């Protein structure tokens, strides 16, 4: 709420917190230019409260002014831009006060159109909230005529406590002023699906400009249609982040009409505005299948899981112990054990003198991988490919990854397993070896797919760079990281708890320094890894702060000169420095040096290059199967034009 107050301060003459607390001299909530910004701030704050317990939306949907809060929560608008929209929109709406009225009708949209037909354009259907929930809006006397006509035919009608006519022809007089007032906002595309109640369907949030917000105020609110669209895309749990669940009944009616056994969870209720009501709502969401971060809920309380009492059996156990990826007697079938968290066996290749390392990945066997989603698709992190190849290099005495180019994502779908092979060729004259990473889905008929290719080098290179024993680094300024993961979620990086290890960030010029830990409540085990992919991936989250193109998603494309110096670290320090590629279209390039929490070197990366990727590309990769999938990124040679002097 304090951040909302700061954001509103440039657009209103009153204090948000004074209004909420009922301070002497504060304006009242009967004013539309006060109540709407206050409701916006409450909705935004309630959404952040849900996020604090691990409930982050996959999609958002807002009703009329509620779309402004939804746009901020999704990452489409900055807090300042959202504050500008709600403050300036409601201020112009206040200029229409006294000239209109709005009435709620318990009937279908078609019946409502029949009721307003007799008064022409003096009254319009303002909102279609559900199969039998409509709001009409217009001139005061004409609205009263419609209300009387409705009651005469047995349609329940209720006057709303407003004196203006949103979503009617009366709004058209402020169109030019509203669009001009909002000309400075900068909406952006986001990774959270945005169901528009202006269009009734999904929209690209880059289009939420001043013109959109005028249409949001003028056109009919298509809540029922937007809900049908969301249900059609598989959404069945709806959390209403509002002081009182005014739309819950309409949402439930729409779900019932669709034949969907969905759930609507309120946040608070009238006269139930405390934490007790919120915790009840969290419990209702959890029972409905929503994931809750219980460690965050009970932080500082000393709470722990307890086993429930069972029947008093003798309890002699006969279950076979589960084995990890590297478990089992692979020697019994002529293989060598890999001793790795993602790889289970090593096969020597007598034809080339190389080796093949094999493993099997799934969200059941490695549930922490589900916490790494980009653009709505769970993929093996780029750091995971590095870990696989480093282990392969260790098997053949190559301590350095000279280069590793990632061409296609390794998608991990629920209920499916993926076989992985890391293929290392025989040694060249200089001791280097080609390496490739393949996968094959457990789907019937799936073929092998190439994900990455590179070169392993013998000992040498990968020299340790910056000294990270002095910490925090001299002359570096601290950076607030409290909004890093919500901000990344707005860009499409959907990191669960296992991949939220970024603890602190500092900047010194163009350098970024980061501190990364294994989240204590994520259940990660670093044993069996050179450097756990979740840890190295968290280092890359700090690198994303160097990215000036904050609206785009990027993925690792090329790793160069990678050397692992030590294993077993759970607490890392990192230095990330930008590199000049000499090619503006080549994407971002950085060097990375990683040490443990005493400054002892752990990993060095000579260069990491990233490339932009779209949600459409990722969705296509997820939808395709096995060997039919095409590479997401490709290596292209650009011709060099030589002048006469050459």
Image (cartoon, rainbow, N blue to C red):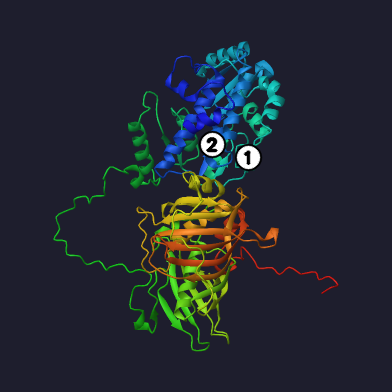
Label 2: state its secondary structure.
helix
Give the x, y percent position of residue 578.
Answer: 60, 58
Q: How many marks?
A: 2
Give the x, y percent position of residue 354.
Answer: 50, 84
Distance from label 1 to label 2 (Cα)?
A: 13 Å
Image mark for residue 381: none
Of the residues under marks 1 and 2, which one precedes in the sequence? 2
Residue 526 falls left or right of residue 509: left
State the image quarter where residue 589 is shown. Answer: bottom right
Q: Residue lying farthest front? A: 474
Image mark for residue 70: 2
280 w.r.t. 330: above or below: above
In this view, the mark in front (1 or 2): 1
Residue 274 falls left or right of residue 14: left
Quadrant of image for the C terminus: bottom right
Residue 69 falls left or right of residue 188: left
Q: Name the foreground residue: 525 vs 150.
A: 525
| Mark 1 lies on residue | 187
Q: Residue lying farthest top? A: 141
207 w.r.t. 42: above or below: below
Give the x, y percent position of residue 243.
Answer: 44, 28
Label 1: state its secondary structure.
loop
Give the x, y percent position of residue 257.
Answer: 49, 36
Residue 114 seen anywhere in this rendered image of the structure: no
Q: Disc 1 vs disc 2: Cβ atoms closer than 8 Å?
A: no
Neighbor class of circle 2 (other Cα within 10 Å; few <14, some 14-19, many 20+) is many
Residue pictured at 53% horizontal, 66% vertical: 605
294 w.r.t. 103: above or below: below
Q: Name the foreground residue: 136 vs 566.
A: 566
Residue 293 seen anywhere in this rendered image of the structure: yes
587 w.r.t. 285: above or below: below
């Amino acid at each position: 709420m304090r951040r909302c107050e700061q954001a509103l301060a440039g657009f209103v003459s009153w204090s948000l917190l004074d209004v909420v607390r009922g301070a002497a001299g504060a304006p009242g909530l009967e004013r539309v230019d006060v109540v709407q910004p206050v409701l916006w701030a409450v909705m935004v704050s309630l959404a952040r409260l849900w996020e604090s317990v691990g409930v982050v939306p996959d999609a958002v949907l807002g009703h009329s002014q509620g779309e402004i809060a939804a746009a901020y929560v999704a990452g489409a608008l900055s807090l300042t831009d959202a504050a500008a929209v709600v403050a300036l929109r409601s201020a112009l709406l206040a200029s229409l006060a006294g000239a209109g009225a709005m009435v709620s009708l318990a009937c279908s949209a078609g019946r409502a159109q029949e009721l307003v037909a007799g008064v022409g354009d003096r009254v319009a259907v303002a909102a279609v909230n559900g199969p039998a929930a409509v709001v009409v809006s217009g001139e005061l006397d004409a609205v009263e005529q419609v209300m009387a006509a409705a009651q005469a035919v047995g349609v329940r009608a209720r006057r709303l406590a407003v004196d203006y006519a949103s979503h009617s022809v009366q709004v058209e007089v402020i169109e030019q002023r509203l669009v001009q007032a909002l000309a400075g906002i900068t909406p952006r595309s986001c990774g959270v699906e945005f169901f528009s109640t202006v269009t009734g369907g999904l929209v690209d949030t880059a289009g939420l400009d001043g013109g959109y917000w005028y249409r949001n105020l003028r056109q009919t609110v298509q809540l029922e249609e937007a809900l049908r669209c969301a249900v059609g895309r598989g959404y069945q749990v709806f959390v209403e982040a509002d002081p009182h669940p005014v739309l819950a009944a309409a949402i439930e009616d729409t779900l019932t009409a669709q034949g969907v056994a969905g759930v609507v969870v309120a946040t608070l209720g009238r006269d139930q505005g405390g934490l007790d009501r919120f915790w009840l709502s969290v419990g209702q969401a959890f029972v409905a299948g929503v994931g809750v971060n219980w460690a965050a809920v009970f932080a500082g309380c000393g709470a722990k899981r307890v086993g429930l009492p069972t029947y008093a059996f003798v309890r002699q156990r006969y279950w076979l112990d589960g084995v990890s990826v590297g478990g089992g007697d692979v020697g019994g079938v002529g293989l060598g054990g890999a001793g790795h968290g993602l790889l289970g066996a090593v096969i020597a290749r007598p034809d080339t003198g190389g080796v093949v390392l094999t493993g099997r990945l799934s969200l059941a066997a490695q549930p922490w991988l589900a916490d790494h989603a980009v653009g709505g698709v769970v993929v093996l992190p780029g750091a995971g490919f590095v870990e696989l190849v480093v282990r392969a290099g260790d098997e053949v005495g190559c301590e350095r990854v000279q280069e590793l180019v990632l061409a296609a994502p390794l998608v991990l779908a629920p209920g499916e397993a993926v076989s992985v092979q890391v293929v290392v060729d025989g040694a060249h004259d200089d001791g280097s070896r080609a390496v490739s990473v393949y996968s094959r889905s457990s789907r019937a008929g799936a073929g092998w797919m190439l994900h990455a290719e590179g070169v392993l080098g013998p000992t040498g290179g990968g020299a340790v760079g910056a000294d990270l024993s002095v910490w925090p680094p001299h002359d570096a300024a601290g950076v607030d990281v409290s909004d890093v993961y919500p901000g990344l979620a707005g860009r499409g990086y959907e990191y669960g708890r296992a991949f939220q290890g970024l603890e602190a960030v500092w900047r010194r010029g163009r350098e970024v320094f980061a501190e990364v830990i294994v989240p204590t409540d994520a259940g990660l085990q670093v044993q069996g890894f050179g450097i756990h992919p979740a840890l190295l991936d968290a280092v890359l989250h700090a690198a994303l702060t160097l990215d000036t193109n904050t609206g785009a998603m990027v993925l690792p494309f090329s790793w160069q000169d990678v050397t692992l110096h030590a294993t077993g670290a759970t607490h890392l320090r990192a230095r990330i420095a930008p590199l000049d590629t000499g090619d503006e279209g080549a994407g971002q390039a950085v060097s990375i040096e990683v040490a443990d929490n005493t400054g002892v070197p752990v990993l060095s990366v000579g260069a990491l290059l990233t490339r932009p990727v779209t949600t459409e590309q990722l969705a296509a990769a997820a939808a395709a199967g096995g060997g039919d999938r095409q590479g997401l990124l490709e290596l292209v040679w650009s011709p060099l034009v030589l002048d006469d002097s050459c």
